[in-house]
Image: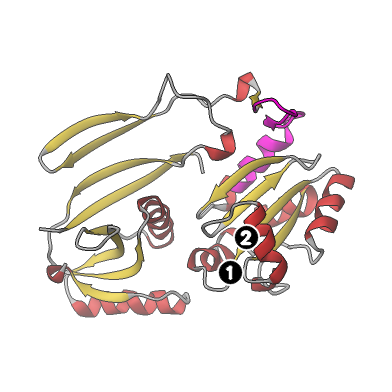
Amino acid sequence: MLKTILFISFFLIAGMGILIATKPAGSTKVSFSDLDWSAAKQKAVDEKKLFFVDFDASYCMTCRNMDKTTFMDNELADYISKNVLALSVDVQDFDGVGLAQEYNVEALPTMLIFDSKGNLQHRFVGYKSAKDLIKTFQETQTKTEPLITTQPDQPLSYEANNNAKAKKINANVSLFGQSINSIDISSPTAEPKPISDLATLFEILVKKQEAKGFSVQVGSFSSYEMVLEQAEMMRELYEQKTIVNVDKSTSPVKYRLLVGNFANRLDAQKFQETLKKNKMDGIVKDLQTL
């Protein structure tokens, strides 16, 4: 068959994560500045604060979910008010288009963190929890030098104590009859990469999903990486089984993300209504048709 259905249980373990007009004042507990980019960044430097930039668009589903979860967190809001100047940039806005091009924003949400001297330290794409952001802010504040420095006519240099350590994902993967006990993603001979470019790491349990029952499709993607990030977000939000339908009949391959495995259509429709209340779209699917 050209189509494969996989049940994937995700446990985020490392790495990684957008908005001006898309976040109306008072819509989140985290306060975003109404200054323009240049003024906001300069103010952060003058006040010796971190500069946090959140790229967003009105159509970004993950962004809206972060508005309801991450940016409604009291601890994060308090931390940012004291230590960080936050700016939301709408990529649909005239200025936002230019900034998105300058910083190579190709997917949403994309978040940037600059240190108190105005140096870019971290770049994230995808859902980030309040706990993750606070941890990254704290780590950035403890550093007195930028993680990445550029000298004229010289390659990038990296602080030795910040070089990425090899990671191993311990997993029990059974796929197409092959069993893999662990996946070593370290590459001893590879050139070091900037910390901001390191890939998100997932611990993954993969097994074939029986084509039985009903689920709710919440998205369709051409990027497997984006499926992983969206699946992790949905698992955290709803604590439901996440299912990926791999459709090889299209070019490029299409990855459909489905949430929940319900015994009947009625239960799936009830979950669909839950999604609608959270302003998320979903389509009930009979797994036998996939």
Mark 2, residues whose alpha carbon is within 10 Å: few (<14), some, or many (≥20)?
Answer: many
* Residue beneath disc 2: 55
Residue at far front of view: 153
Spot occupied by residue 4 in the image (x, y as percentages of width and height)? 17, 56
Vertical order, 5 against 93 (above or below): above
What numbered label is drawn on residue 57?
1
Secondary structure beneath dot 2 equals strand
Identity, as a three-letter code, of the amino acid under mark 2 = Phe
The image position of residue 211, as x and y in percent, is 12, 63
Q: Where residue 134 appears, x then y in whole percent?
A: 64, 45
Q: Is residue 85 left or right of residue 12?
A: right
Q: Which residue is painted at 57% across and 34% down in the image?
A: 195
Real-space CA distance between mark 2 and mark 1, rounded to the nearest whole angstrom: 7 Å
The residue shown at (65%, 26%) is: 155
Q: Position of residue 7 (x, y in %)?
A: 23, 53
Give residue 78's quadrant in the image. Answer: bottom right
Q: Which residues are magenta?
A: 133-155
Q: Nearer the viewer, residue 27 or 252?
A: 252
The amino acid marked with disc number 1 is Ala
